[in-house]
Each structure stands twice: as C-alpha cells, then as structure tokens.
C-alpha cells in the first residue's frame, strides 16, 4: 500500500489508517535522544527542499513529537454506518440553517469567488460546513492540536508512510518560513488538516490564495483565503464545471436494468432519458448533452441518482462518494430544496464488521477487488459486489452488500 493521498487520510480517519497497518515504535521505550537524532538526520532532507537551516533549527528545537497520534482508538464499529445514517448526521437542520445564514453573511465574498472560479456558492458553503462546521471545529481545542508536533511524530514513527509525512512536515516548515503562520498558529487534526476547509500543508502551499489581500495566505481567521483556495482546488484538481450542479435524484422505470446504475457507465443525459430515466421532481433536465452516471448507493430499494462531473469534483476533495453526495445534498438544502423523495431502505439489516470482512474476503478470493478486507464498505466493495452479481446472474445487480448477497456467497 502506497502513501495515502491528502484526502484519503482525512476521509478514513485515524481508525482506518490504524486498521490498514498503521504503527509507530514502542513509544514508552523510545528516548528523546533518538528523536533528536532523527531531527538532525532529517534536517538535510528538509533544507534540500527549501527550508532554511536556521528556521528548521528554531522550529524543530522546540518540537516534541505528539505521540498521542499513535494512541487513537483502533477499534471499529461492530456495524458499518449505512449511507442514510451518514447523510442524516451531516445534512442536519443545524448545518442547513447555519449554511443559509453564512451564504447571506458572506454574500459579497461568495459572489467574488463565483466570478473568479465559477464554483457555486451553495456547494462551496456546504463543503465548508462539512469540513469544519463553518469554522467552529477549526478552533475547537477538543478536536484540534498543534500540527507540527503531530507531523513530526508521524514522519519519525510511521515507517510505512514516512515519505508522505516527511513531505507534509517540510511543507509545514516552508509555510512558517514564508511568514504565513507561526508554529503556534498551526493547529489542526492529528493528520495535519487545518482551518475552515481543513487544508493539508501541501494544499496550503500550492492551492492557497491571498483572497483578502493581507499579504499572506491563511486558512484561519476570515474565511476569504480558505474558501477561495478551496474553490481553486475544486476547479484545478477536481475539474469543477461552472454553472452546473452535482447531479439529480432520479426515478428509474420498473423494467430498468439496475446493472447500468453502477456509477461507472457514462452516457449523455439524453441517452439516460431515452431509457426512461426522469427527475423525481418532474422537471426537465437542463442540459441533455451533459455526460452522467447513474448510481443506487443503497440498492434498488433506495434513492437513485444521476451523477454529473461536479460530484466528482467534490469527490476530489475527499475520495468518498457518500461524502460528495452529502455536500451536494446539503448544498441543495441550503439553496432551499427539499429532502430526497425516495425513502432509504432503513429496514435493511446492516452487515456486522465481521460479516463485511467475510463478504470482502470471499469476493477477493473469487477475484473481485474490494480494495481490502477491513470491513469498511466503500465504492470498491460495492463495485466488486455488483461485478460478482453480474457474473452469477443475480438480480438486481445493484451492488448493495446485503445479507442476501453474503448468504449467496456462502452457498457458492
């Protein structure tokens, strides 16, 4: 397994990293002397990448590794969180109402960002709400901690991902060297994500924008730089398309082949329409030449969605489809839209962690790539389920990892 991407780390949380084999040294047996030795060795790599030696010495001489990053609870829930619970916890009344307030409060700022980058204010505001509860979490000492000690601990102690953490520590030191922040200013998650929209140091350096023109780039304080830099990220790395939405909740005809709703097959909206796909609202599709995918994330008994390019732009910020769907739906609710029309199949029994691991293991043994056997059901596992369903002629081939699927796998 290679080094995690910026958003992969944040998407999974520490528990996911730990389950994948994250580990540090035996901290109780590791002396301060050994860390000091590592600091001296690492200096040459940091200075080779642009950190001034005197700046390095000043910061690192005051840094002790925050070894609590290795004490995070490694346990996983006994039952995986279904998508409807994930969405309900995030697209809640507080976020909807606060989002509407923020859109009004920062109307001028959102307007300027829309003009420069073309990112819809409601989607950008929803992302802000998802990442930091509109800035509340970014300064909450219960959740945030000094970033440089965390990154130093990870760069020193996580042998499997050392190069990733080393580079992010170097990025953080360059930020200090540029005068954008002091080490004390840089507080964030255990993994180093900071500010209103939870930037990793690499994003701060390469995507950041001095939108408030105060001479420095910062994801803290006023939201101007954070929101503008995030809009830039969505455009440059996510290929966000100006003037378009993320997608639609749709209605599939009774005879529709669920295997087509795999989240991968690309057709124009007009082609999907010709197959009987309509919007649940009854409104026409605004641009029938848009390319789109269909998905039924909870199986055919739940809502169906048509995903457009901007859902994948949102997904570039965190490689989780349910994360992107939550932002898209929250944006629609902030805009004034209603909840999803088709109910979620809340009476479906969820697989336990052990059962999900068994399902993944059996699929892997049959040659279907689930992306791992840690019991965390994501896009790859659902794609593997759907591919297996097709291979055995199981209908509907909707990719939903149900109890019925597991029983069929057990029966061969």
Image (cartoon, rainbow, N blue to C red):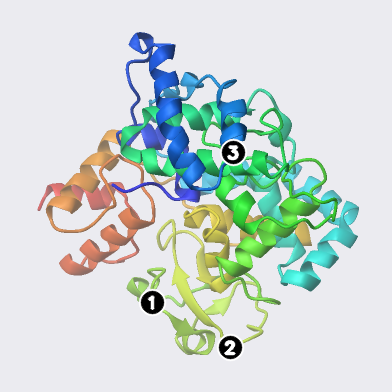
Would residue 165 appear left or right of 95 to someone viewing this image?
Answer: left
Distance in Å between CA atoms under marks 1 and 2: 16 Å
Distance in Å between CA atoms under marks 2 and 3: 48 Å
In the rendering, which numbered label is found on residue 288? 2
The residue tagged with tag 3: helix, strand or loop?
A: helix
**Residue 334 or residue 10, whichever sits in front:** 10
* 1 or 2: tag closer to the N-terminus: 1
* 1 or 3: tag closer to the N-terminus: 3
Would residue 207 appear left or right of 349 to someone viewing this image?
Answer: right
Residue 368 in view here: yes
Quarter holding residue 63? top right
Q: Is residue 191 above or below residue 212?
A: above
Labels 1 and 2 touching (C-beta < 8 A): no
Residue that mark 1 sits on: 265
Neighbour tally class for label 2: few under 14, some 14-19, many 20 plus, Cα within 10 Å:
some
* 2 or 3: tag closer to the N-terminus: 3
Q: Residue at x 62, y 52 (%)?
A: 205
Quarter holding residue 162? top left
Q: Residue 186: where, in percent of width, then height? A: 66, 34
Labels 1 and 3 touching (C-beta < 8 A): no
Q: Residue at x 66, y 30 (%)?
A: 183
Labels 2 and 3 touching (C-beta < 8 A): no
Q: Nearer the viewer, mark 2 or mark 3?
A: 3
Residue that mark 3 sits on: 173
The residue tagged with tag 1: helix, strand or loop?
A: loop
Q: Residue 14: where, in percent of width, then height? A: 45, 33
């Amino acid at each position: 397994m290679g080094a995690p991407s910026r958003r992969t780390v944040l998407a999974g949380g520490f528990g996911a990293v730990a389950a994948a084999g994250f580990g540090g040294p035996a901290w109780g047996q590791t002396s301060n002397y050994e860390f000091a030795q590592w600091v001296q060795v690492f200096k040459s790599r940091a200075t080779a990448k642009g950190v001034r030696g005197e700046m390095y010495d000043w910061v690192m001489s005051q840094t002790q590794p925050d070894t609590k990053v290795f004490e995070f609870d490694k346990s996983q829930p006994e039952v995986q969180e279904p998508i409807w619970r994930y969405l309900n916890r995030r697209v809640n009344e507080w976020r909807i109402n606060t989002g509407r307030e923020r859109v009004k409060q920062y109307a001028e700022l959102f307007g300027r960002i829309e003009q420069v980058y073309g990112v819809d204010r409601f989607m950008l505001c929803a992302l802000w709400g998802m990442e930091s509860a509109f800035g509340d979490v970014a300064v909450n000492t219960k959740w945030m901690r000094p970033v440089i000690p965390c990154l130093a601990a990870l760069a020193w102690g996580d042998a499997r991902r050392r190069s990733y953490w080393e580079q992010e520590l170097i990025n953080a030191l360059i930020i200090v060297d540029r005068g954008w922040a002091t080490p004390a200013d840089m507080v964030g998650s255990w993994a180093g994500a900071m500010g209103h929209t939870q930037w990793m140091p690499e994003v701060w350096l390469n995507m950041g924008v001095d939108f408030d023109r105060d001479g420095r780039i910062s994801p803290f304080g006023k939201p101007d730089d954070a929101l503008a830099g995030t809009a830039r990220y969505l455009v440059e790395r996510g290929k966000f398309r100006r003037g378009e939405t993320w997608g639609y909740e749709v209605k599939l005809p009774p005879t529709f082949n669920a295997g087509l709703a795999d989240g991968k097959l690309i057709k124009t909206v007009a082609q999907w329409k010709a197959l009987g796909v309509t919007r649940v609202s009854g409104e026409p599709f605004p641009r029938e030449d848009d390319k789109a995918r269909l998905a039924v994330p909870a199986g055919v008994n739940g809502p169906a969605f048509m995903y457009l390019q901007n859902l994948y732009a949102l997904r570039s910020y965190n490689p989780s489809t349910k994360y992107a769907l939550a932002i898209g739906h929250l944006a629609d609710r902030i805009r004034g839209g209603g909840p999803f029309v088709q109910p979620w199949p809340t009476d479906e029994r969820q697989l336990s962690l052990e059962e999900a691991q068994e399902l993944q293991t059996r699929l892997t043994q049959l040659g279907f790539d689930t992306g791992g056997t840690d019991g965390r059901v994501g896009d790859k596992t659902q794609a593997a389920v759907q591919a297996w369903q097709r291979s055995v002629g199981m209908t509907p081939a909707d990719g939903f990892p149900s109890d019925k699927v597991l029983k069929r796998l057990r029966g061969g």
